Image (cartoon, rainbow, N blue to C red):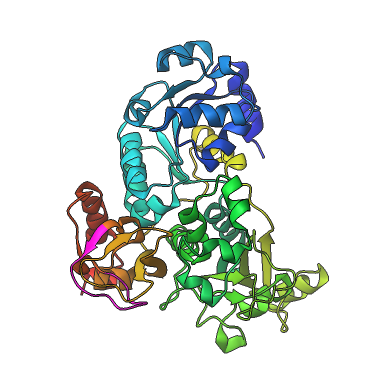
Amino acid sequence: MSLSSMLAKRHEAGRPIRVGLIGAGKFGSMVLAQARKIPGYHIVAVADLDVGKVRGSLARTGWEGEEYAATSFGDAMDSGRTFVTDNAAALCAFDGIECIIEATGHPLAGVRHAIMAIDAGKHIVMVNVEADVMCGPILAQRARQKGVVYSMAYGDQPAFCCELVDWVRSSGFELVSAGKGMNFRPPYRYSTPDTVWSYFGWSDEFVAAGDFNPKMYNSFTDGTKAAIEMAAVANGTGLDCPDDGLAFYPAGLQDLAQVFKPEADGGRLPRAGLTDIAASREPDGRVVMNNIQYGMFVTFRAPDEYTRQCFAQYGLLTDDSGWYGSMWRPFHLIGLETSVSVLSACLRGEPTGTAVEFRGDAVATAKSNLKAGDWLDGEGGFATWAKAVPATLSTRINALPIGLAHKVKLKRDVPQDQIVTFDDVDMVDDLDVVEVRQEQQRTMAPEQVRAA
């Protein structure tokens, strides 16, 4: 409850929190919308390969032209204004900045920017979950060794899942599962950028009038984003991804504790200790009553009869037995809340969720019968969807993470729904990131894999 008062003291002392933002898309725009309303919180610079996009985002979110008219990093520091640049490396290197927000959404760029920031001794808030799930455990390890914070972004669902898990453990309950809500049913799995709008019920005219990225929306539709985020939650909490990927159990608020408990106790989970999704639609398309499409949840068990009685006395939503309960957060506001991560890193030296081990993975999986010579087109594309699996499996079979499945050519056929491996593809580019990933697999894979 102290971040705002701690920031106020910094502001009064003339020492604002100085921040660099990389990426001026939707998330970055939401960051910018709130930044100018927080005294003592200074966006020194915004970097994007398209500087026109940056200026458009600033103008759209209410900034006056003079506020982002700084001519250099130094001028921004001295004047309190913001510098617009296309040079992310220079932004990471600039001494005056304390914390970098990486919001490009590009997994390869995200890994590179994180390394630059960490090497420069800066905290980093990794909005880029795509990069985090691919290399986050080793990036977080490097940050700890350097004495800086590597953090999930408050406002995004993985950070809130980690917060809820921390609440469960800090309260002394028995953690059972964690996850988020999502609009999903099985046919969505094979959606492509050409078919995605039909799942939203949007007309061609509506889409043409908006600024919609079909691959991004398709990543949410086909379950890829869910796999990425739940694998990140696994790495941040010590929970596991299901052995055969996320099940997307339909469940509303009233059903969370009943559904997300072990099968042995009448639930649907193979066992306790898993991440998964509360789907907002039944397999036949009906909308689930009281669904949590935009929310996050945890389920937990009372450790004894007294606590079980307290669950009932205070109105907790429980399963039929009363032993299992659920807690949730109904909404998340992504970039509008990310300043909390920056302030936590700079003022407390604490992340709002971080990868602590390599436990879950999001791996490329064929959407159709792919042939040798086909090109993979990454997250939300035509060729693959991401499957959330335990790192024990992905490391053992040398699975290709979804973050590296872009502009990569297949060397051999891969049947529909089979995981793509490094042995299936010809990796000729992005070898620096491949090496970071392989170092993570060599040094941070689960013990039973390294011992094999």
| Residue numbers of the magenta segment | 408-420
Q: Is residue 267 above or below residue 444?
A: below
Q: State the image coordinates of residue 383 (x, y, percent, origin top left).
A: 35, 66
Residue furthest front as drawn: 205
Say which of 330 and 359 sits in front: 330
- Residue 28, relative to residue 165: is it above or below? above
The residue nearer to you, when weighing 128 against 174, is 128
x 58%, y 52%: residue: 207
The quadrant in which the N terminus is found is top right
Q: Is residue 15 above or below residue 363?
A: above
Residue at coordinates 41% horizontally, 18% vertically from top-left? 73
Q: Residue 287 in the image: state x and y as whole percent.
A: 70, 73
User: Please, what is the dominant secondary structure of the magenta stretch?
Assistant: loop
Residue 20 visible in rendering? no
Which quarter of the image is occupied by the C terminus?
bottom left
Task: Judge from the rendering whether residue 274 lies leftward or rightward of residue 2; answer left or right.
Answer: left
- In the image: residue 131, left or right of residue 223: left
Residue 416: say if magenta. yes
Q: Position of residue 110 (x, y in %)?
A: 37, 44
Q: Residue at x 53, y 32 (%)?
A: 347
Counting every numbered tag in the picture gives 0
Q: Is residue 370 left or right of residue 163?
A: left
Task: Give percent across and percent down for residue 441.
Answer: 26, 61
| Visible residue check, residue 296 | yes
Seen at 64% across and 27% down, the residue is 62
Q: Nearer the viewer, residue 27 or 191?
A: 191
Q: Quadrant of residue 164?
A: bottom right
Tell me if residue 358 is in the magenta stretch: no
Query: On screen, 333 above or below 55?
Result: below
